[in-house]
Image: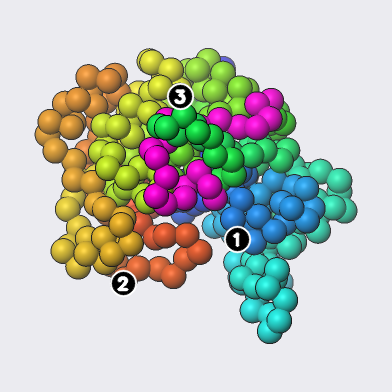
Amino acid sequence: MKGPEDVPRLVTIGGRSGPSLIVQGFRGYGWAVTAIVTTTDSGSSSGVLRDQFGIPAPGDIRSVLAAAANPQPNLKPLADLFEYRLRPAHDPTLRHMALGNLILAAFSEALGDFEQAVEAVARLLDCWAVVLPVPSSPATLCARLADGSVVRGERNVRAIGKPPIVEVFLEPAVVRVPDACSRAIQEADLIVFGPGGLYCSVLPGVLPGPICQAVQESRARTVYICNTTTQPGQTDGLDSVAHVREMVRYLGEGHLDYVLLNTQVPTDEMIAAYRQDEVHFMPVTPEEIRRIKALGPTPIVGNFVEQDWRGMRALHKLDTIRHDPHKVATALQTLLV
């Protein structure tokens, strides 16, 4: 039982996008935040380190650690370099390798455990939020497609041009999950899923049995932050109702309380910029809001698009129309009033 002196406790579950958004938005608000970050990425420098060191993908964890960093002045240069990507003249295996990924791999090798490596780096960066990897053992994200075939590896799951995704699952099905994840979920007042890739970032966070069970047994209020756009290879042609329906399917009926929906239409310039990469804005209509409510969750609607957009970001994966962290934090805080 929590005493009146306890601060609100929030757990965010997903890949880089969702936990980073929450960590940025709630910094300085006095909440206790735990970020449960998926580690099933298989592309770019994360994929190289998975293969070379037999560790879970460090890339999304690295980004969330950097977002939560609150280092002492003498360690600030290290924190600033954590997201720096190397540009070697010759060796392609190190091209675009994030320095933070190498540091996590080194700690993992030295300590013999990836979960301990994340904890050690969080202490080094004096992270204000708790950051936990899920799973904390190597696992492969797989998808069963509409034609009955199965693809393995996150990179293949999000590949463009394949049949639609019917189901995602992990191999092996039983994976390591830090005990701290279940404790954080049990003690949470609010559990937030997303935003981010539905099949490659958000749902992998709830695929491990202990996580899904803990969410279903938790008395916390649960919220899904629905994406503002479709994502090529994952959610082509899907609307907000389909996103929510998938979340309800994997969490179980009755375990999703709220859905945060952006009803602000971005500028024509923003929409056109992303459309060239087949990233399509998902307008939320009154009919969709009604259908989402019929699925069980209560819709929270509003303008959640990021402020002061300055153009698309050059990322290793496709950029999307992002949520504004402070707008989202303001909306989420009202759920515990």
Residue 209 colored in magenta in the image: no
Residue type at mark 3: give it: Tyr
Instruction: Identify the image quadrant of residue 116.
Output: top right
Tag on residue 250? Answer: 3
Residue type at mark 1: give it: Ser
Residue 144, image x and y in percent?
49, 32
Q: Is residue 224 left or right of residue 2?
A: left
Residue 251, image x and y in percent?
45, 22
**C-alpha separation, residue under disc 1 versus residue under disc 2:** 25 Å
Q: Which residue is mark 2?
A: 310
Asked if 238 appears above or below 41 in the picture, the reply is: above
User: Which segment did they paint magenta?
Assistant: 155-174
Asked if 29 appears above or below 92 in the picture, the reply is: above
Residue 57, image x and y in percent?
66, 49
Residue 167 colored in magenta in the image: yes
Q: Nearer the viewer, residue 213 or 337?
A: 213
Question: At 35% across and 57% down in the image, what residue appears?
Answer: 320
Q: Which residue is mark 1?
A: 44
**C-alpha separation, residue under disc 2 versus residue under disc 3:** 36 Å
Q: Earlier in the sequence, mark 1 or mark 3?
A: 1
